[in-house]
Amino acid sequence: MGIYLLLAVVFFLQRGGTYIATIRDFVAVPTLFAAIATAIKFRNGGRMIPLALFASAAGDWAGAEGNFIMQVAFFAVAHLFYISDFTPRIKRLERGKVAWATLFAIGMLCFLGYVMTHIENNMEFYAVWIYGIIIASMGVTALLQTRVRKALYVIAAVLFIVSDSFIAYGKFVEPIPNGNTWVMTTYYAAQGLFMYLCLRRSSVEE
C-alpha cells in the first residue's frame, strides 16, 4: 500500500510540474501497480479485482491520450469485473439492503439523466448511457453483497462513482473548480481501497 500511495503522490507532483517533469501517461502507473500487486496474490483474492485494476489502468492511459470513448469502454470493462467479484457474494436480499440499493439506483439514474440532457454528440450520448447503467450496477451489487469488510467495498464503489460523476459533470455540464484534482483524488482512493481489500483476503470467499 505504501508504494501505491507514493506513486499517487508522485502523480500529483509531476502533474503540477512540482519537482518532477510531467509525464502524460504516468496517470496509469499507480493503478497498474495495484493491478500487478493484486494479481500476484490472486490465489487468495481471486482474479476479478486484479482484472478490474488492469482494465482501469488501460482506461487511465486512454484518458491521458485524449480518447474519451476508449476510456469509457475500458472503465466499463473494469466495472463488469467488479460486478463479477461482488455478485457471487449476494446471498440473500434483505429488505434494508434492497431499499438502500433502490434509493442509490434512483439517485444514479436521476444524475445520469440530467447529465445526458447536456450531451450533444450521439456516440458520447450512448457511451455515457451504457456506462452509467454499468457503474450503477456496480454500486448496487456492492451494496447487496454480504462479505467481510462490506462497508469498505461500498465506500470504494461510491468513491469510484463520485470520481466518474465529477468527470461527467465537468465535461458535459460545466467545469468544476479544481475538478481534475477531485477526480483523481477520489479515483485513486477507490482503487487503493479495492487493492487493500483484495490483498487482505484470506480466501476467494472472503
Image (cartoon, rainbow, N blue to C red):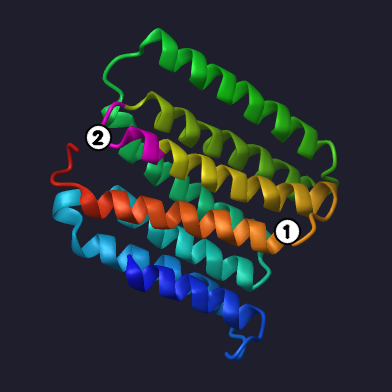
Q: Is residue 46 visible?
A: no
Q: Position of residue 50 (x, y in %)?
A: 31, 56
| Highlighted magenta segment, given as a residue range | 146-153
Write the residue at 32% across / 65% down: 1
- Measuring from the top left, give residue 28's x and y in whole percent: 49, 71
Look at the picture and state if 56 lies above or below 66.
above
Helix, strand or loop under label 1:
helix
Q: Is residue 27 above or below residue 152?
A: below
How busy is the neighbourhood of tag 2: few (under 14 within 10 Å), some, or many (20 plus)? Answer: few
Q: Residue at x 63, y 78 (%)?
A: 15
Figure check: 3 above or below 204: below
- Residue 9 is tagged as none
Please, what secondary structure does the residue beneath circle 2 have? loop
Residue 63 percent across, percent down from the top left: 62, 66
Determine crowd level at label 1: few under 14, some 14-19, many 20+ residues with C-alpha closer than 10 A. some
Position of the C terminus by quadrant: top left
**Side of 188 where 199 appears, left or right:** left
The tag earlier along the polypeptide, 2 or 1, is: 2
Q: What amino acid is at disc 1?
A: Gly
Q: Quadrant of residue 81?
A: top left
Q: Which residue is mark 2?
A: 148
* In magenta stretch: residue 174: no
Q: Which mark is residue 179?
A: 1
